[in-house]
Amino acid sequence: MTSPLQLILAKRAGGEHSAAELKEFLDGYVAGAVPDYQVAAWLMAVCWRGMTQPATKVTPESLAYNADGLIPAIAQQYDTREVLMLAWMDAEAVRRTLATGGATYFSRSRQQYWVKGETSGHRQRVIEVRYDCDLDCLLLLVDQTGPACHTGAPTCFTDRVLTAGGPVPGADPAE
């Protein structure tokens, strides 16, 4: 068995541990074989390493775009966390969004940029742009004015439910 002290020292030195080693360590703690002070020291080592790692600066250019140069962007109402819509962005749309604070997307069908609400007035004021762990999806926390969906529905997901048996009758306004 790898001793807790060995795990702590290896972690402080930047070493990685297998899932089995970490499970053994935690099982030892649960069984009472690992004293609290060693767990606390291990957690401090983990946190210290995370705090001392240089932060990687993520830029629009460093995001992971698909073969068409696009990344999916999910718009979510910032205060209620309701998912509003999904659209696509390229690096320029991301830059424009960050620069203006207005959600700017790239239309795959028209092959041009569009600012949400530019014609309808149903704008999205961007509060924050988040990226996922793989850098291949964005989450825009927005303050939506009016309905988010081009159909006039509050969200693009309003009353649309898909089940293993197909759509739920009457749930899709397109029926």
Image (spheres, grey):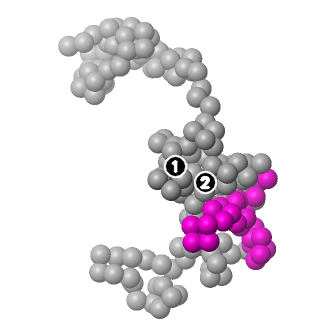
Label ID, residue 124: none
Image quarter of residue 53:
top right
Residue at 59%, 26% in the rendered image: 55
Residue 88 seen:
yes
Q: Looking at the picture, does residue 10 appear above or below residue 109?
A: above
Q: Position of residue 6 (x, y in %)?
A: 32, 8
- Residue, disc 1: 65
Residue 62 lies left or right of residue 160; in this view the side is right
- Residue, disc 2: 90
Q: Looking at the picture, does residue 4 appear above or below residue 29?
A: above
Q: Position of residue 24 (x, y in %)?
A: 24, 22
Residue nearest the observer in this picture, 33 or 166: 166
Q: Quadrant location of the N terminus?
A: top left
Residue nearest the observer in this picture, 35 or 117: 117
Of the numbered discs 1 and 2, the one sitting upstream in the chain is: 1
Extreme residue toward the left, this view:
1
Q: Position of residue 147 (x, y in %)?
A: 68, 75
Residue at 68%, 63% in the rendered image: 113
Q: Looking at the picture, does residue 115 appear above or below residue 78?
A: below
Q: Which residues are magenta?
A: 100-124
Residue nearest the observer in this picture, 96 or 32: 96
